[in-house]
Image (cartoon, helix red, strand yellow):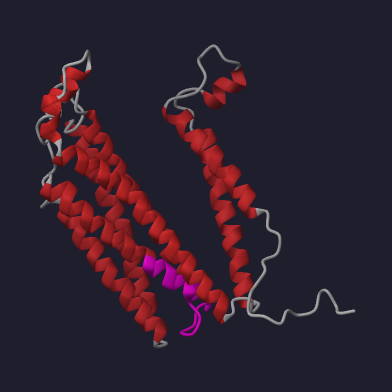
Amino acid sequence: MADAHAAPHHDYHLVNPSPWPLIASIAVTIMMVGAVVWMKGIVGPDAGPIATALLSDGKAALFFAGLAGVLFSAFAWWADVIKESKGGDHTPVVQIGLRYGMIMFIASEVMFFAAFFWIFFEMAVFNEARAHIPELSNWADTAAAWSTWPPKGIETLDAWQLPLLNTVILLLSGTTVTWAHHALQVGDRKAARAGLIITVLLGVLFTAVQVYEYQHILHENLFFNEEAANSGLYGSIFFMATGFHGFHVLLGTIFLLVCLLRLMAGQMTPQKHFGFEAAAWYWHFVDVVWLFLFAFVYVTFG
C-alpha cells in the first residue's frame, strides 16, 4: 500500500488546516460592530454597567480590540504563507495562482470604487432632473438643494492646491516603487531599499496631507453648515470615496513597509519576490484610482 504521507507528484500546494481565516472573520466582525458603537452606540444609558462601558456611544474599546485581532491574524496568516514559500511549496504553478488571485482581488477593488463613482456621477450629471421632482413633504427642500451643482451651500475645494499636491506625491511614489522593483529584479538591493524607503515616506506624506485637508473641511464647515442643511449627501460621498481611497493608501503603505523589512532581512531575491510585486500592483491601482478622483471629484465637478 502506498504511503498516504508520501511527497506529492504534482505542482500544486494543498495548504494545511489554518485557524486564521476564522479568527480574522471574527475579528473583522468585532471591529465593524465596534465602529458602529464608537460612532453611534447600540445601547442606551440605562443598560447595565458592562454594556454601557463597551457598547454606548463614543466607546472605542471594542473597535480597537477587533482591530488588534485583525492585525494579529494578518501577521500570523502571512507569516504562514512566507514559511510555505521558504519550504518550497510555492512552485511555478502556485505562483501563477497567487498572481491570478491578486489580479482578481484588484478587480474586485475596481468594482468597489466604481460604485462610489456611480453615485457621484449620478448626483453631479443629473442634478437638473431633480428640479422636476414633485414636492413631497420634506423631500422638497432636498430636491431644491440638489437641483444645482455644486449643491446649495456647498463650498468645494480648490483642486490646484492640496489635491494637486497629493496627486504629485502619488505619481512620484509610483515612479519610486517601479524603480525599486526594477532594482530588485536586476539584483541591486541597495537601490531597491532606497526606492522602497522613499515610496513609504511619500505614502505617509500623502496620508498626512489628506488628514490636513479633512481638518480644513471640517474646521471651515465647507460641506456641513446651516446653508447646506439639505446637501449633506455631497459630503457623505466625498468622504466615502476619498476616505476609502486614503484607507487603501494606508494599507498599501503598510504593505510596502513590510516588503522593505523583508528585503532588509534578505527574504527577497531577484527570482522570488512576489510579495513585493503584489504590493507594487496594489500601489499602482491606488495611484490610478486617485487620478480618477482628482479628475472628476476635484476638477471636473468640483
Query: Which is nearer the eye, 246 or 2?
Result: 2
Query: Which is nearer the eye, 235 or 145?
Result: 145
In the image, residue 74 lies in the stretch drawn in magenta: no
Residue in the image at 41% along x and 67% along y? 279
Percent coordinates x, y for residue 28 in the rendering: 54, 43
Percent coordinates x, y for residue 25 in the rendering: 58, 46
Q: Is residue 236 visible?
A: yes
Count of numbered marks: 0
Query: Which is nearer the eye, 24 or 109?
Result: 109
Which stretch did the figure color magenta?
A: 262-281
In the image, residue 273 lies in the stretch drawn in magenta: yes
* Side (left or right) of 299 relative to 281: left
Residue in the image at 83% along x and 74% along y? 4
Check the picture and name the quadrant holding the C terminus.
top left
* Side (left or right) of 134 relative to 63: left
Residue in the image at 30% along x and 52% along y? 207
Percent coordinates x, y for residue 95 in the rendering: 53, 75
Residue in the image at 11% along x and 26% along y? 131
In which quadrant of the rendered view does residue 46 lie? top right
Q: Where 13 sits versus 115, above or below?
A: below
Percent coordinates x, y for residue 3 in the rendering: 85, 78
Q: Give the residue at the far right of this rendering.
A: 1
Check the picture and name the quadrant holding the N terminus.
bottom right
Q: Is residue 246 visible?
A: no
Q: Where 1 sits versus 141, above or below?
A: below
Q: Where 245 sits versus 42, above or below?
A: below
